[in-house]
Image: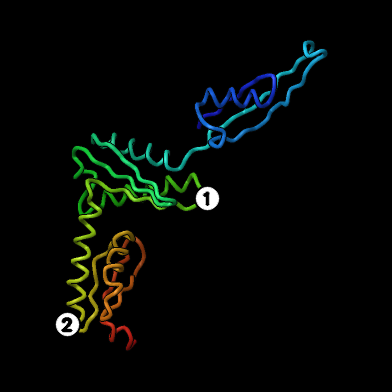
């Protein structure tokens, strides 16, 4: 966190001096006026400068991007990060070398990184921000796999007239399953258990209704 104490003839001049030194705009800082200063006799004798303390307020998206860069660097991966912001939704797309290490088995490493990035972003804001971290379009490819899996297991549930339980999945992937079957009038989906062991159940419509 950057903090500057600046002095000048007036409060406004002291604030501007601090902003210039920090290289940020006024909406990115908190300002504490330590001394309003005063003009001396005839504006010459007994002058007292104004003193302000200016603190840069951490920006949640910038802090998250810095966090991701540091983690990737420490993993020994050379990569670039592109971000797309849409209101309170932010997508960080990572491309580069050794991306498989960043994704991990079944996306476990990537999911963990996304969770940590989510925590970092929302540490610096009161307005919830939804963070998605993707690597080499893994999320898109994984979504296609999960959608196909959901449809296949839905057919099984309908054919056997029994509930089908999936393996535990992170919240992000459970949403994909729910969405894939949302318009299927023959089955219902619901989640069971607690994190990180929460899983989805696909149940034939009549089976769920008979309970």
Relative side of 8 to 77, left or right: right
Relative side of 208 to 47, left or right: left
- Along the line of sight, which residue is nearer the eye, 192 or 4? 4
Q: CA distance from mark 2 to mark 1?
A: 48 Å
Give the quadrant of residue 46: top right
Tell me how many marks there are: 2
Give the quadrant of residue 16: top right
Q: Secondary structure at mark 2?
A: helix
Is the residue marked by circle 1 packed among few (<14), some (14-19), or many (20+) residues within 10 Å? Answer: few
Which residue in the protein does label 2 denote?
159
In the displayed structure, 72 sits above or below 139; it is above
- Along the line of sight, which residue is nearer the eye, 14 or 72? 14
The residue at the far bottom in this view is: 210
Q: Position of residue 171 (x, y in %)?
A: 33, 61
In the displayed structure, 92 sits above or below 173; it is above
Q: Position of residue 137 (x, y in %)?
A: 23, 49
Seen at 31% across and 40% down, the residue is: 82
Seen at 24% across and 41% down, the residue is: 95
Which residue in the protein does label 1 denote?
126
Q: Which color scheme does this rendered protein use?
A: rainbow
- Along the line of sight, which residue is nearer the eye, 91 or 68? 91
Tags 2 and 1 touching, CB below 8 Å: no
Quadrant occupied by the C terminus: bottom left
Is the residue marked by circle 2 packed among few (<14), some (14-19), or many (20+) residues within 10 Å? Answer: few
Q: Secondary structure at mark 1?
A: loop
Indicate which disc, 2 or 1, sits on the residue closer to the N terminus.
Answer: 1
Seen at 38% across and 36% down, the residue is: 66
């Amino acid at each position: 966190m950057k903090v500057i104490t600046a002095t000048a003839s007036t409060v406004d001049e002291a604030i501007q001096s601090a902003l210039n030194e920090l290289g940020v705009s006024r909406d990115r800082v908190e300002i504490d006026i330590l001394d309003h200063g005063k003009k001396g006799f005839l504006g010459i004798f007994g002058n007292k400068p104004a003193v302000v303390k200016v603190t840069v307020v951490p920006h949640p998206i910038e802090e998250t991007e810095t966090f991701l860069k540091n983690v990737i660097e420490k993993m020994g991966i050379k990569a670039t990060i592109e971000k797309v912001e849409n209101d309170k939704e932010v997508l960080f797309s990572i491309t580069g070398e050794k991306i498989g290490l960043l994704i991990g088995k079944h996306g476990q490493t990537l999911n963990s990184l996304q969770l940590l990035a989510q925590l970092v972003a929302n540490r610096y804001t009161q307005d919830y921000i939804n963070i998605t971290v993707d690597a080499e379009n893994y999320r898109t490819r994984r979504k296609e796999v999960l959608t196909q899996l959901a449809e296949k297991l839905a057919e099984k549930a309908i054919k056997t007239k029994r509930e089908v339980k999936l393996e535990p999945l992170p919240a992000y992937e459970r949403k994909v399953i729910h969405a894939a079957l949302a318009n299927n009038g023959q089955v219902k989906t619901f989640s069971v258990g607690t994190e990180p062991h929460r899983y989805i159940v696909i149940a034939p419509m009549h089976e769920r209704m008979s309970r």
